Image: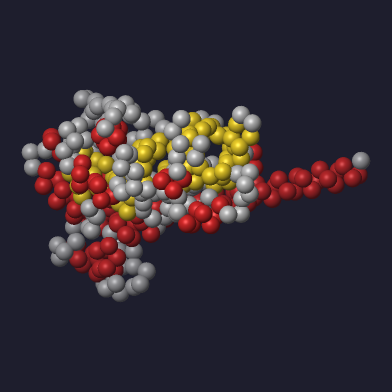
Amino acid sequence: MTQYDIKDLGWDESFDSAFEKYGSSYIPGRVSSRQRTVFDVMTASGQIQAGLSGALHRIGRIPATGDFVVLLPQPGAYTIVDILPRKSVFTRGVPGKDGKDQVIASNIDAVFIVTAIGPELNPRRIERYLSVAHASGAKPVIVINKADLAEDIHTYTKSLSKAAPGIPVISISALTHSGLSQLDPYLTPGTTVALIGSSGVGKSTLINALLNQAVQSAGDIRGYDGKGRHTTTVRQLFILEKGALVIDNPGLREVGVGTSGSGIYETFPEIRELAAGCRFSDCRHENEPDCAVRRAVEEGVLPKERLESYLRLSKELEFQHEKAEIGLKRLERNKWKGISKVARDIHESKKG
């Protein structure tokens, strides 16, 4: 069984400090994947499977791939009793009444937004991915896969660079291993990178190329609609030969912006800069007079598509915040209902 030095898994002084309060009966580990009701965890003793403590389960604290956790070893079993504070967390908004965000990966240093030559290469989709990537606290990098299929790859890199000001745009071919060395600056020992993107863009092929072995099943693109088949079914953390850690994710059909607004502002830096010239500080850039952002569109300084995308994502963010607020009120109401029921039961038992 392969043993791991916890420091090689991305552990740093902040985790040292957080783990200090636990006694010698506990050990640390990093979650590499979730398998239904148990978790695969990398530890100094090797990769083990651990269940979740009842206390964590009751309060809904579920570890994500990439989390550093506190484990209680027991005869023939391990139990996750706590999750150490996250340095960064990649989430997305999901459909539902409570407006909760879904955690995709945690403690990541960079996010590779993987797209590919074909129908999935869409600047508007990339803006959506960037919004959630910026909010995670990790550095986003755009990776155009299947570059060998393009007659002029520079046309595509230029298009995405306009939709992602200041963000690295790297073109590669995972199948032929062309251009992979361009990713090396983001894959240094101890750093963690999460791969996100739609099905069929070649994330699994990229993982296999980085590992120099076939560990993930690689699918293809359906001919009749240009969409990819899901090949990765669980989020999984891999360690590369040079010491970097990579988290592969199932293809995302929908990418909700969730409740993290900061990511949207970072995705559209030119709009944020132009907004300083609006008459009103709370200008929504829709129908307000003397809007510097709309004026920039009229003068051809700002592409109309950029403003439309910004407004669309901003409205989605506002809607998610409203759902989250309603969800919190519902949780609070249910909590007090539970407390009232307990109080009534106590009262009835005393009467009896």
Q: Position of residue 21 (x, y in %)?
A: 61, 54
Looking at the rendered image, the quarter that the C terminus falls into is top right
Q: Position of residue 324 (x, y in %)?
A: 50, 51
* Residue 296 sits above or below residue 45 on the image: below
313 vs 221, left or right, is: right
- Which residue does the image show at 41% across and 46% down from the upper left? 8
In front here: 321 or 219?
219
Residue 194 in view, yes or no: no
The residue that appears at 11% across and 47% down in the rendered structure is 154
Residue 210 in the image, given as x and y percentages of width and height: 27, 37
Compared with 28, 297 (above or below) is: below
Whether residue 145 sits left or right of residue 204 in the image: it is left
Residue pictured at 21% horizontal, 25% vertical: 223
Q: Nearer the viewer, residue 9 or 254?
A: 9
Q: Is residue 221 left or right of residue 132?
A: left
Q: How many marks?
A: 0
Q: Position of residue 63 (x, y in %)?
A: 51, 42
Q: Residue furthest left?
A: 151
Question: What is the quadrant of residue 289 in the picture?
Answer: bottom left
